[in-house]
Amino acid sequence: MRKTVSAFALVMLAAHTASGQSLSDILNPIETQDQQTRPDSFSQLSKQLMPAVVNITTSKVIANDLPMFEDGEPLSEFNPFFGRDPEGFSQEGALGSGFVISADGLIVTNDHVITGADEINAVFSDGRTLRAELIGTDEATDIAVLKVEQDEPFPFVEWADSESAEVGDWVMAIGNPFGFGGSVSVGIVSARNRDIKSGNYDNYIQTDAAINSGNSGGPLFNLNGEVLGVNTAIITPTGGSVGLGFSIPSNLANQISQQLIEFGKARRGWFGVNIQNADRDLAQAYGLEEGTGVIITRITDDGPASKANFEVGDLILNFDGRPVEDERALSLIVADTEIGKSVEVELIRDGRTLLVEFELGELNADTDDEEDEVIDTESTLTDNLLGVDFVALTEDERRRYRIPGDINGVLVRSVSPRGPSFGKLQKGDVVMEMAFEVVETPEAALLAMDEAADREGQPLLLRVYRNRQTQFQAIDVDVRG
């Protein structure tokens, strides 16, 4: 049965400003709302939450090189039109949204709303405009925290647990679309964990609640009046809402905002490795049935991983007790893990499951995340099991293919279009290892292929150097011909 706002909550709202109590506590002091049952109306919910939502206006002083028309000249009346003023400067404004998260006036919004601003103002629902101080900002997650001051406590809202949200739950957005402050729209959670390729930490809540320009930085509420997400992006062919809005999940936004408040910047964990996804073929080469996990392709010198028992080629399955499905999952887990924590990593190496423990470092801003000449040649070795012409890696070949001196292996000179390596290996690759064994001569490569043929049904795992990076390829060895 649908639950409604109690009369007690309505009475308490009037006393909120004096008490400094959160609006979500006032909204529902006893029991939580059913997130999947649509209320008869959203009017009470929006009325109670509106005082904690603000419109953000910004201005930027820009040097103006245009000369002023003198007073009395025929064109002097056009000075304001061209952005000219007696000081030789002009201003540009931007509009966005935000919401208050504490009684002492801390406000969360988007980084892109306030980037480059010289002056930031928060406009409240009762018309008050307060100058805002920038506390901190994080471009990677598009979160910024501001601070406003007044004598009385501010009405504020609390964070929801975004992990508890389900697809189909009702949500409500309040914001400042196109400058129309105090606008309310409703919809549902359309999807979770969306990656829209906007950055390394994409993990958005998708909603069909109308999100438009100016809603950026505003809250996406659940029916308890808690902030489920921070509205940040839309996908649209028209410039307006087409039901594809995206919000930063509250758990991530809360974590980043607290770091900005405490440290003035976001702090993220640093593993110190390069990785690649383990597709089904690669996973089978490690003895797994399905593609999952990530493979370490490089270990950063002096990074956290270099101080522990990690090796290139390790297939990571779990990090700090959390399953690692792919590169994106590991990036999010590492960023979310406490800096300095002793972390246990479960991995596969040489067919064995190992546990490696290390201390997670801190990612700094300056930390690395990290056409060739054609040779016409008659292939003499493409009739082997891989269908690849391997040649020795000479100094001439190193210069021709720009291969560093610390890279050793056999050079791929050509790949048969009818062989199993076609599309996986290419001319100029250096195969450094086969089945975790170093290969430095074409003869050693042929021997490794023959040994792989004895392990019928298991792909041959290759460690390959290409384009200044190492990666892994799993190739089914053709034993039919």
Image (cartoon, rainbow, N blue to C red):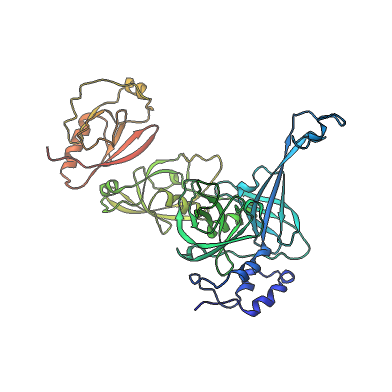
- Residue at 45 percent of width and 40 percent of height: 300
Q: Is residue 373 visible?
A: yes
Residue 461 % position (x, y):
27, 42
Above-or-below relation of 137 to 68 = below
Residue visible at 24% across and 28% down in the picture = 390
Q: Tell me residue 471's x, y (percent).
A: 35, 39
Foreground: 292 or 196?
196
| 108 or 313, nearer to the observer | 108
Q: Residue furthest left?
A: 481
Q: How many marks?
A: 0
| Residue 163, position as x, y percentages in the image | 48, 63
Left or right relative to 415: residue 90: right
- In this rendering, position of residue 469 left or right of residue 61: left
Q: Is residue 155 left or right of residue 438?
A: right
On the rendered image, what quadrant is the C terminus found in? top left
Q: In the figure, residue 70 lies in which quadrant?
A: top right
Q: Residue at x 53, y 55 (%)?
A: 247
Would residue 359 be visible to someone looking at this image? no
Give the residue at the far right of this rendering. 72
The image quarter in which residue 45 lies: bottom right
Of all residues, the one furthest to the front in this rendering is 74
- Say if 426 sits above or below 358 in the image: above
Residue 433 horizontal/vertical position (percent): 28, 37
Q: Nearer the viewer, residue 141 or 313?
A: 141
Task: Out of 117 and 394, give the one closest to the viewer.
Answer: 117
Q: Is residue 27 left or right of residue 368?
A: right
Identified at 55% across, 66% down, the residue is 222
Examine the image and state in which quarter residue 174 appears. Answer: bottom right
